[in-house]
Amino acid sequence: MKYYLAYGSNLNKRQMARRCPDAVPVGTVTISNYELVFRGVATIEPKMGASVQCAVWKISPEDERSLDRYEGYPRLYVKQDFWVQVNGKSFRAMAYVMVNNIRPKSPPPTDYLRTIVEGYADFGLDDKPLIEAAAKGGEANE
């Protein structure tokens, strides 16, 4: 089993139950010095002073293979490890991060955003930063 950090559509418990039947939610964390960005789909990118809310899942090797397919690993996303702390326990967790900003910034499709909003609700996260990031996805590259 390994720990997986979700910040996009894989926050959605209903979706994860279908895609990763062995996955167990562990808790939530905030990743510092990263921001949530939309390039049609969600990714996280380094930005000093920013932060991203994430859910932590415990996943099986079969779940990871399913996530690899869903995330387009390694063409669209690569895996990056982060040290996180949940309930006083520190451990390494893997997140999918878009390859070299391979896509331009663009807003997410409505259904995709709705799935993420549901995931934020599933974990009791504040969706204001999510909505702001989705709106910024429509702006020209900075």
Image: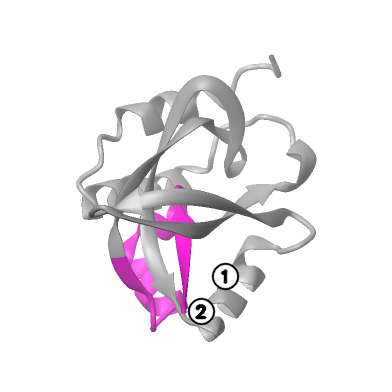
Q: Quadrant of residue 42?
A: top right
Residue 17 lies in the magenta-colored region: yes
Answer whether labels 2 and 1 touch (C-beta < 8 Å).
yes
Front-lying residue, 71 or 30: 30
Q: Is residue 36 above or below residue 50?
A: below
Residue located at (46% from left, 56% from top): 5
Measured as percent of width and height from the top left, residue 141 is found at 71, 19
Question: Could you tell whether 123 is left or right of 135 in the image?
Answer: left
Q: Is residue 5 left or right of residue 128?
A: right
Measure the C-alpha gap from mark 2 to mark 1: 6 Å
Mark 1: which secondary structure? helix
Residue 43 is covered by the magenta coloring:
no
- The C terminus lies in quadrant: top right
Q: Residues within 10 Å of mark 1 (few under 14, many from 20)?
A: some
Query: What range of the chain is rendered magenta?
Result: 1-25
Local SS, label 2: helix
The image position of residue 127, as x and y in percent, is: 30, 35
- Name the residue that disc number 2 marks: 63
Marking on residue 67: 1
The kind of residue tagged 1 is Leu
- Pointer 2 local density, CA inside 10 Å: few below 14, some 14–19, many at least 20: some
**Is the residue 16 above or below the residue 124 in the image?**
below
Q: Where does residue 138 sit, x and y in percent of width and height?
A: 59, 23
Residue 94 occupies quadrant:
bottom right
What amino acid type is highlighted by mark number 2?
Answer: Asp
